[in-house]
Structure formats: structure tokens, C-alpha cells
Image (tube, grey):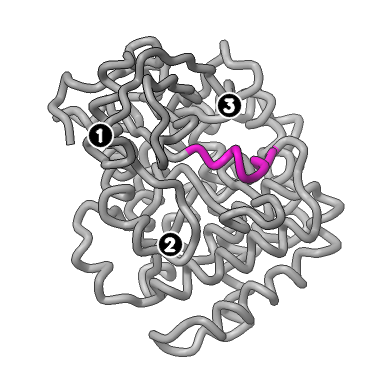
Amino acid sequence: MGAAQSFPLHPPEVTPEWLTDALRQDGCIREARVVSLTYDVIGAGVGFLGQIARITPAYDVTEEGAPRTVIGKFPGANEDARQMAAMYGFYACEVNAYRHLTPHVAIRTPRCYYSAISDDATTFFLLLEDLGADGRMGDQVAGCSADDARLAVRELAKLHASWWDDPRLAEMDWLPLGTTLGRMSMSQAYPVSWQICLDQFGHLLTQAQRDALPTLNERLLLMMDDFDTTPLTIMHADYRLDNMFFGHPGGPYEFAVIDWQITNKGWALYDVAYFLGTNLDPALRRAEEMGLLREYHAVLTRERTRGDDYDWETCRRDYVRSILMYFANFIGNAASLDPANPRGLELFGLMISRISAAVDDLDALSSIP
């Protein structure tokens, strides 16, 4: 929806006239007209590839169903980040996800009112339901409680189970393979980033991890051959607290997930490893990790209707290897960090320290060639 140059690229470019047309195209307003609006940029420093604004419209008449607030998602302000998003197809993936996928996943997602992307896939725009009025947004820096983690893990298992080994995945040509993205990261991004990461964040790593960095990507490329035989499912791939909403009691949802920019057809435990390894305080993870993983496996086993048996030992092995893959992917992303984004740097450092602790606790380095 929308031609290449017909959509806003920055929050100030959203006008009352444009917003009226977009909301009418979706059918959530019919007679009402947006006469003015305000916006607030939210999540500054949270995301590296996009910018987000909460938009509050004022209407000329009251109309049932007219949204009180909406979320505008725009391309990132950093040119290098935008080019990286285009190279990996992240913007195109999220637009397609809201058009073709999220209405059919077993997890609550925001309604998409409008979507558009440029021909070269370097710019895009999404107009989304604002989930904030009916729930609280997670905070990856603050972490979460064991109860919140349990809910997030159960919902993730339902998402994975509903698409496990599903033949429809083969029809989604626009949805990339997780192993393809992983190999691109290990062969292209990692070689130019590991030294940058070591220089800036090496103090957060163990000596064994620092020693492994120069050749870790080559060893993981060999390990990834095993994931080619793992059943595919829908992988969110950015399953972190900043992308989660926990509903208020009695509200319209219990749990919801946003940001489908890097979703792909991948191996399920990658999502589990990212969530447990980088969102939980290390002390809480150590106390709850195996219990949460067993709960994930139990729900996956109960809800899954396709594919061969996925036993507990295989699940645990894939979890440990996925912890290591995420560790390496963070290292590969170091070169794309914006030095002018202090919260982004703080968050990245926190995630590196948490995933480093998980790699060490699980002796994950010993799980690869």
C-alpha cells in the first residue's frame, strides 16, 4: 500500500490529512477527520534499525473505533543501519510480516493500519495499533520477574508449535531462512566487527571468550550445518522485553509482541536463547533457566501437531548452541552501533555481559567444533 515516495519518513512528516487518508483506507474511521495531531518519539536508543513515535490525533467528530493513539514506525536515522537493514531485507520482511503473517500467528500482535516500503527497501513506514494503553511495555535493561519470564516462554512455545514444520513456510518466499541470515552474519559482518567489539566490550568477556573471538565465526559456520536439519518454524528473532507488552488485568490481551523486522524461518531455540540469555538478570537466569526451558519444551510438545518428536535432550543441546550463536551475532553487530546513541551502547553492553555469562555458565564454547 502506498507508492515509493507517498509515505512519511520521519515523525514530522505525518500530517492530519495524510493520517486521515491512512485510517480511512484501513476502515477504522469513516466520517471522522483528523484535524490536528501531536507526536512523541518513544524508545530512544532502544532499537538500532528504526525509530518509533506515538501519534495522538484529534478528530473533528467522535466516532466509535477511531484510535486514540497510534504508533508510527520509521526507518532508522543512521544511514549505515538503513543500508544494513536493506542488505538483510529487514524492512521488507517486517512490512510483509504485517501484511501476510501476523494475522495467522498464535501470539497477539498489534493491528497494522497502514504499511509501505520503497522500491529499494531502504525506507518504509508502518502505522500500528498502540498497545500501551492496555498493558505495560517490558524493559530489557531492568529485566523481568520469573512470572513474566514464564508467560513469555509459554507464549513463545505456542508460536513455535503453531508453525512447526509447517508446509506453508515453503510458500513464503519473502521470509528468509534463519540459517542463511546466520551464515551471512558469520561470513560478512563478524570478520569486520569482532576486533571492534573486543576493543570496546572486551572487558565484559572471559579470557576464554576473548581468545575464541578471532576464529569463533568459522567454528560456528561448521556447527550451523546441524541446524539445516532442524525442523523450521516461525522465529521472531528479536524476542526481547523491549518488544513485549504485558496486559493489564481484565484488558483485551494478556501478552503481545511487536517488531517483526527480523522474523524468519528458523530453528526455534534461537528465540528461547535470546530471551533467557539477554533479558534475565544472570542470577535469575541461573535459578530459573532449566525450569523455564523445560516449561517451554512441555508446551511445545503439547501444542505441536506436526513433525517428528523433539526430545528434551535435543532441545537442551539446541538451546546451548543457540546461546553461542547469539553471542557471536552480538559481536557481529558491533560495527553497526551508533556512537551517538548512549542508551543503545548501554543496552548493547548489558546484553553482551549477560550473554557472556550464559556462555560461561553453560560451557557453550565446548559444544562446537
Q: In this view, does 338 lie to the left or right of 305?
A: right
Q: In this view, does 37 lie to the left or right of 328?
A: left
Query: Which one is earlier in the sequence, the residue at label 2 or at label 1?
Result: 1
**Bounds of the magenta span?**
130-140
Which residue is label 1 attached to? 24
Mark 2 → mark 1, Cα distance in angstroms: 47 Å
Mark 2, secondary structure of its residue = helix
**Image quadrant for the N terminus?**
top left
Residue at horizontal 68 percent and vertical 52 percent from the top: 277
Label at residue 43? 3
Mark 3 → mark 2, Cα distance in angstroms: 33 Å
Type of amino acid under label 3? Gly
Q: In this view, does 282 lie above or below 155?
A: above
Q: Nearer the viewer, mark 3 or mark 2?
A: 3
Residue sitting farthest toward the bottom: 309
Mark 1, secondary structure of its residue = helix
Type of amino acid under label 1? Arg
Give the image location of residue 276, x and y in percent: 68, 56
Query: Which one is earlier in the sequence, the residue at label 3 or at label 2?
Result: 3
